[in-house]
Amino acid sequence: MSHTITHPTRQGKVRDIYDLGDQLLLVASDRISAFDWVLPTLIPDKGRVLTQISKFWFDFLQVPNHVLTTDLSTCQLPAGLDRDELEGRAMLVRKCEVIPVECVVRGYLVGSGWRDYQRTGKVCGMALPTGLLNCARFDEPLFTPATKAERGAHDENISFEEMSAIVSPTVAAELKARSLAIYRAAADHAQARGIILADTKFEFGWHGGQILLIDEVLTPDSSRFWPADSYSPGRNQPSFDKQFVREYLESTTWDKNSPPPELPPEIVDKTRTKYIEAFERLTGQAFRWK
């Protein structure tokens, strides 16, 4: 019996999710978002890059996770979906009960953590030494959970105690330990490939009484990756993500409150190149979809 779903059950900024009963089909599109807007211009192959990076990490980490297969030849797809178009950008996964907390690990003082530190001397309520520079490396990575925001809103940092009240102290301790262990393993691998994993966020879910790592994992959309050979604290770092897109949009007259402009071809090409470079450096494999 074939699935008759022709439209995504849920559509995020970047991904389309098809509910197949006890399984989900996660499809990473080539859409790109910035400043909480989905841009009108696609980044060719971006969805494939994100899916293939996630697949690499799920295989490398060997932690309990939700992935069933990325081989669509073994799957019965919803009617109306083009198998060739989905190739490389889709994952069939177990349907899990999502744990409603983002598990953020920070190895470096950057982004909202840097802004928080400048204002309060702390990151997410945790006191830090004085005099740290922008993008300084922490002696030990920090676990800084956040609430999962509704679509269109920002995630909100919470304390570990607040997280414990949401998911129970036992589950909170387990998620913290898992998140830090995964971050350290991934950061060590990335460092050996000439890439700094500055920070990342994980999601977990319940399936059959077991906690599984779910969603995308350690991609340029969920993490900050920096080239190690140009790292220098005290300034923003070049990165393998949407940097070119953000910088271009900041240079335009766009007010961030109205529909965003199209991206010029050179920005699209640079962004695509950065995503592919991240994949190839992290995995040691050539990107196959040219």
Image (cartoon, helix red, strand yellow):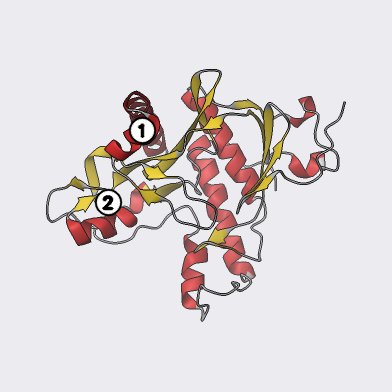
Does residue 250 appear in this view?
Answer: yes
- In the picture of the structure, the residue carrying the numbered disc 1 is 188
- Kindly state the secondary structure of the residue where label 1 is placed: helix
- In the picture of the structure, the residue carrying the numbered disc 2 is 109
Rendered position, 192 above or below 124? above
Give the image location of residue 227, x and y in percent: 39, 50
Name the amino acid type tagged 2: Leu
174 sits left or right of 44 in the view: left
Does residue 286 appear in this view?
Answer: no
The residue positioned 64% from the left and 71% from the top of the image is: 262
- Kindly state the secondary structure of the residue where label 2 is placed: loop
Nearer to us in this view, 76 or 155: 155
Mark toward the start of the polypeptide (2 vs 1) = 2
Give the image location of residue 102, x and y in percent: 43, 41
In the picture as drawn, the residue positioned furthest to the bottom comes out as 253
Which of the two marks, 2 or 1, is nearer to us in this view? Answer: 2
The residue positioned 37% from the left and 38% from the top of the image is: 191
In the picture as drawn, the residue positioned furthest to the right comes out as 1
Locate the N terminus and report the quarter of the image it occupies: top right
Nearer to us in this view, 151 or 279: 151
At label 2, counting other C-alpha atoms closer than 10 Å, the crowd grade (few under 14, some 14-19, many 20 or more) is: many
The residue positioned 34% from the left and 23% from the top of the image is: 170
Name the amino acid type tagged 1: Asp
For the residues bearing labels 2 and 1, Cβ distance under 8 angstroms: no
> Quadrant location of residue 182?
top left
Give the image location of residue 57, x and y in percent: 51, 32
In the picture as drawn, the residue positioned furthest to the top comes out as 209
Give the image location of residue 38, x and y in percent: 60, 61
The residue positioned 66% from the left and 66% from the top of the image is: 40
In this rendering, the count of numbered labels is 2
